Amino acid sequence: MSKLFYREYGSGKPLIILHGLLGSSDNWLYHGKLFAKTFNVFIIDQMNHGNSPHSQSINYKTLTSDLFNFIKSKNLSTVNIIGHSMGGKVAMKFALDYERLVNKLVIVDIAPKEYPNNLNFNYIIQGINSLNVDSISTRKEADDLLSKYVSERYIRNFLIKNLKRNSLKNFFWKSNVKLITDSMKDLYSSISNDSTSYSKVLFIKGEKSNYILDNDWDNIISLFPKAKILTINNSGHWVHFDNPEEFYLNVMSFLK
């Protein structure tokens, strides 16, 4: 069993934070340290991301199994989980498969449905694959090339955090970009609805995001009958960056 990289802060009841696709624990340091005033926070690099190992496959079954093994290795009895985007789908599947281990869930701007034509992310994947990392000499150069595909600077900053230098000072992707590119059908897939979780779940939607639609609610309630939804003003898909204060206050209010 490969061990996941994680960052741990604070003390109290356990709170696990799961980043989105092509993200890492780095993306959640600000909020992780805030939540650590109240909770024992674990921010995980999911498999094939950040400082965690690479594997032969990536899908919600394997990512959920990784999370279960992590919780078991830390001897945690019940946990709270915040999951953004891909991490939100992992959190949902985990609650459906291992409800006894879940206290509360916060699902950030993702629904349990299939996303067949998620054009925003398709552009991001195209942008990453357009970069010839062997020929790039600076992060500024990478940013300029990515800007043709991804207009938002802060999203490009996320992506460029995945670029590291090796011992020869050449850039390489820390995320398993090839596997992720080849697995997008699995990563866009729905979370199966053959079970139900009665965990308390807060779905957070970005006001300007189209990832959670009104007609997704019936599906959400069929899986999570105790779910509530909240829209955060002035935010898109990266809710916690667009409106960090409102995000933090609402999540804390729900978790406490």
Image (cartoon, grey):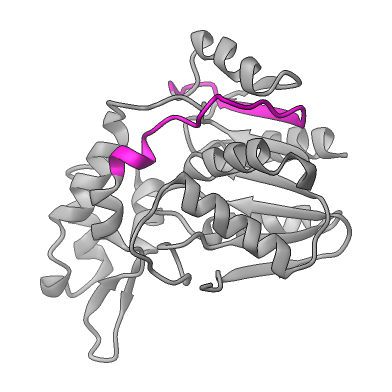
Q: Position of residue 82 (x, y in %)?
A: 66, 44
Asked whether residue 208 is drawn in magenta, I would say yes
Q: Residue at x 56, y 55 (%)?
A: 65
Q: Quadrant of residue 9?
A: bottom right
Q: Is residue 240 visible?
A: no
> What is the residue that sits farthest to the bottom in this orientation?
167
Q: Is residue 181 left or right of residue 152?
A: left
Q: Which residues are magenta?
A: 184-210
- Location of residue 172 with respect to 60 vertically, above or below: below
Q: Position of residue 137 (x, y in %)?
A: 18, 75
- Which residue occupies the foreground of this view, 238 or 125? 125
- Location of residue 185 with respect to 228 vertically, above or below: below
Q: Position of residue 169 (x, y in %)?
A: 25, 86
Q: Is residue 45 left or right of residue 32?
A: left
- Which residue occupies the foreground of this view, 10 or 34? 10
The quarter of the picture where the C terminus appears is: top right
Q: Is residue 160 visible?
A: yes
Q: Is residue 197 left or right of residue 134?
A: right
Q: Is residue 242 left or right of residue 73?
A: left
